[in-house]
Amino acid sequence: MSVRFAFASHTPLKDYCEVAPAVSESVESAHIDLRNWVDEYQPELVIAIGPDHFNGFFYGLMPSFCVGMSTEAVGDWNTPQGELPSSEELATKLLAYSHRSGVDLAYSHNMRVDHGISQFLHELFEWRMLPPIIPIFVNCAAAPRPPLARVLELGRIIGQFARAQSLRVLVTASGGLSHDPPIPSITTASGKLRERLIKGGDLSAEARQARQEIVVQEAIKQRQGESLRLPLNPEWDRTFINNLQRFDFDSLLSLSDEDITSAAGCGAHEIRAWLTGASAAKECGITKLDLLLYLPIPEWVAGYGIMRGQIMKD
C-alpha cells in the first residue's frame, strides 16, 4: 500500500490578473516542489477531488457527490480541454466499496469537470501524460450542500479504498479557502441565466468570455479596494489550515454554512474538497499534513494554499 496526498487552491485568474513578482515566484516555487514530489512518486492512479462552477453540474440534477467513470475536461479559464484517462474498473470498485460502507455515491459515464479539478491536475502533470484518474465531484456551490460530517465520511471511504490498492495512489484535493466571487444562485437568477443554471449546456465563446469578464472585473475591484464583496480573510484561512493539518475535525464540524459564508465568502464552501482529502489522509495513517505555502492573493480573489502528506514508509 502506498498513498500520497496533494492539496491546493485553484483560481481561474492565474493567467488573467498579474500579481507582484515575489508572489508569483512563491506560488510557482511551491508548485514546482509539489510537482517534483509527485513526479518522484510516479503515481499509478489519481483520485481527484474537487468542486464544479456550473460547468458540469446544474440545478436540474445536483448530487452531493459524483464519481466519474468517464470524464471530459471542459477547458474553461485557459485550462486543458478533452477526455481524461480513466479506469472504469477501479471507479466501479470504488463505487461498490462505498456502497458496502453505507455511502451511496452518484456516478456518471459522461462527467464533465472544470478548473475546479483540472487546473490542479494540470499543475502536477504534463496533460498528455496523466495517469488514470478517478474524479470525485463534491457539491460546494449549490445549496443545500452536503453536511461537513458527510464530507468527512466520504473522505474515510476514499482513504480506506486507496490504502487497499496494490498501486501507487495519489489523492488530490483542490478547492478555495476564503474568497467571495460572484457566483450565480438559483434563488436570485432569472431569465436565461436561471434557465442555464437548471438545464446546463455549453456556453458560446462570447457567453463564456462575458462570464469570465465579470470575475476579472471583480478581481480588479478587490485589488483596488472598491469591491462590495467580502475581502479575503487570512486569519480564518490560517485557523482552518492549522486545524486541517492536525486533523482537528471537531473544531471544523462546528462551522455552519452561514458561519462560512459570513466569515470567508461564498467560495469558501470549497473547503469541503480539502476536508474530504484530509479525512482520507487520516484514514491512511498520516499524522500531519505539511504546509508548503499560504498567501492571501486579492488579485486572484484567493486565499491560496498548498499542502501535502504521505505515509512515512510508502
Image (cartoon, grey):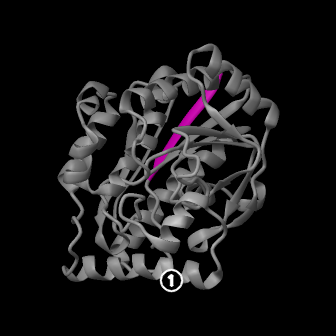
User: Which residue is drawn at the image coordinates 73% and 33% (left, top)?
Assistant: 91
Magenta highlight on residue 2: yes
| Residue 157 on the magenta span | no
Residue at 75% from the left image edge and 49% from the top image edge: 110
Image height of 225 relative to 137, above or below: below
The residue positioned 55% from the left and 82% from the top of the image is 209
Horizontal side, residue 262 vs residue 80: left or right:
left
- Measuring from the top left, give residue 248's x and y in whole percent: 29, 27
Question: Callout 1: 10 Å neighbours few (<14), some, many (20+)?
Answer: few
| Residue 294 position in % (x across, y down) | 32, 55
Of 257 and 19, nearer the camera is 257
Q: Which residues lie in the magenta part?
A: 1-8
Q: Which residue is mark 1?
A: 210
Q: Quadrant of the N terminus?
A: top right
| Quadrant in which residue 86 is drawn | top right
**Number of marks:** 1
Q: Mainly helix, strand or loop, the magenta region? A: strand
Quarter the C terminus occupies: top right
Residue 279 lies left or right of residue 40; in this view the side is: left
Q: Position of residue 239 (x, y in %)?
A: 22, 42
Pick the residue in front: 134 or 23.
Answer: 134
In the image, residue 169 sits, relative to residue 139, either above or below, namely above
Image coordinates for residue 261, horizontal then vertical, percent: 26, 51
Q: Is residue 295 above or below residue 15?
A: above
Q: Tell me what residue is drawn at x 42 percent, y 58 percent.
A: 186
Residue extending furthest front? Answer: 191
- Residue farthest to the top? 100
Q: Secondary structure at mark 1?
A: helix
Q: What amino acid type should be assigned to the residue bearing mark 1?
A: Ala
Q: Please state which of residues 129 and 191 is positioned toward the viewer in this rendering.
A: 191
Q: Is residue 312 left or right of residue 81?
A: left
